[in-house]
Image: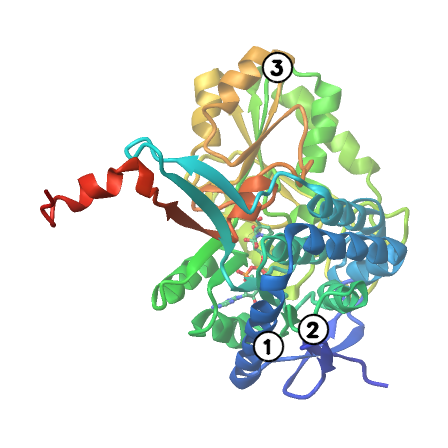
Amino acid sequence: MEKIFGNIINGIEETGGERIELKSPVDGSLIGYIIDTDKDTVERAIQSSRAAFNKFYPMSTIKSRQELIGKLADIVQEKATIYADLESKNTGKTIRQSTFMDIPLAISHIRYFAETDEFKFQRKITHPEYPGTEGIVQNAPMGVVASIAPWNVPFLMAVWKIIPPVLAGNAVVIKPSHYTPLTAIELVKDMKAAGFPDGLVNLVNGTGRTTGNFLVNSDHVDMVSFTGSTPTGSRIMEQAAKNITKVSLELGGKSPNIVFADADLDHAVKGVIFGIFLNAGQLCESASRLIIEESIMDKFLQKVKIYLDSMKSGNPMDFETDISAITTKEQKEKIESLISQTVKSGGNIFYSKNMQGTPDNGTYFPPTLLTGLTPGQQISDEEIFGPVLTVYPFKSEKEAIDLANSTKYGLAAGIWTKDIEKAGRVASMIEAGTVWVNEYHLLSAAAPRGGFKKSGIGRELGLEGILEYTQTRHIFYGNNESGMSDVAYGILIKTE
Ligand code: NAD
């Protein structure tokens, strides 16, 4: 029987409308269909969220919203293996990664927002210009947030795009990627089970060209929270300008991993491999550029090669497999085209892994190392979003920093050295929203993340990430006793 994964609007799953096929990158099998949501339905979802916001927000508190978020964490925890299975089938990421990283990390992030006491709805101030008066500064919700998510880490992204705005008091209409919507749909269903009011979070499926576009161009959303590529983010910012809609943009990256000669090389090599080959390089902060001190380059690359040889290719649904599939055919073609252009322009394939054991009809690309490159080449500047590591040697600290900062992106970076003073000095010069020292990819819900330069605007996670979904209101309480009003009004109304 055909399986249709519907939209969730006002607590009801709706399966009518144009359909889009959903195929697994693991083996090309048909998973089912989703709806390519039309404009009227998108507007209906927005109206439903607006009504739920108007009804629910005034009678809720941070604490009552956190209680619901906590219940949701319990439900998702119970179903963790179901979520992991869905996530891996839909994205092609290894079942080991879904089971031990993506799903537990997302659950811990839901719990963080259920428990954090950092977010305060308001604070008291005094006004130094007007002695005796007081004010309240409130962090009011935006209203209805349109959340648009990418295909690479769908469950974690759904959590980031739904939970912080809801904690801040908003309603949400979320559009997952039309390639990987399954765990987001499951999450919104589980929100009903946790007791969230119907309509507070609605989910509409579809492509960016259709559903995403209708959401961003609606006159009735108060904010667009977008995670995806830099070109799409730029288009969304342009479209949002029409209605002066606030945007937060979490965009692409071209992150460097800088390895100094004094690093613990065995640790660094694991960090470099993890930095680029986790999720087959399809992570926004994937450390796709290895910037390595020239004196250790040959020795280090040999170590990388040995580790890559030991990684197991195969069916990602098998717990032994180390290498994820490429989630979409389009993405695989993009990677292939970038590599062949690089080779034509003189780049050298230093290593390409044999991908034996992968299922037929799946979408796979071998972990690859490219050398002989310079900054400014397309492969050095553009986000590859695949399991491809490009290598650049450096001689001095300044050269390492210049190379790290040589792209238009600024999302993340890694620094590998035993000299912590040097690490701090270099980290402060890196144009990036996150810098890991002797680590990579470790995400904390307590820490704001986001991009410098063309990697985005705004922050996700941490207190900054919650405040992103608020607007500030200042209430000024006058004080008749202070006489300040008489002094001020005297400019216009002369009194005795
Ligand atoms: P994408 O930009 O193609 O699409 C992202 C989302 O936007 C999808 O849901 C898509 O349907 C929608 N969309 C596309 N065009 C639209 C339009 N005109 N109007 C409204 N919505 C539209 O990105 P992708 O290929 O799904 O994801 C990969 C990209 O996401 C990479 O560049 C990656 O670096 C980035 N990413 C960034 C972060 C971060 O936190 N900075 C996290 C994950 C992924």
- CB-based contact (under 8 Å), mark 2 and mark 1: yes
Q: Nearer the viewer, mark 3 or mark 1?
A: 1
Q: Is residue 106 left or right of residue 419?
A: right
Residue 380 showing in the rendered view: no
Q: Is mark 2 within 8 Å of ligand 1?
A: no
Q: Position of residue 97 (x, y in %)?
A: 80, 47
Which amino acid lies under the numbered mark 3 shown in the image of this protein? Ala
Res 377 → quadrant: top left
| x, y percent for residue 187 | 75, 63
Q: Which residue bears the numbered disc 2? A: 198
Residue projecting furthest to the front? 496
Quarter holding the N terminus is: bottom right
Residue displayed at 35% across by 34% down = 132
Disc 2 is placed on an element classified as: loop
Q: Could you say which disc has been placed on residue 261 in the image?
A: 3
How far apart are labels 3 and 1 at the CA level? 58 Å
For label 1, the residue is 48
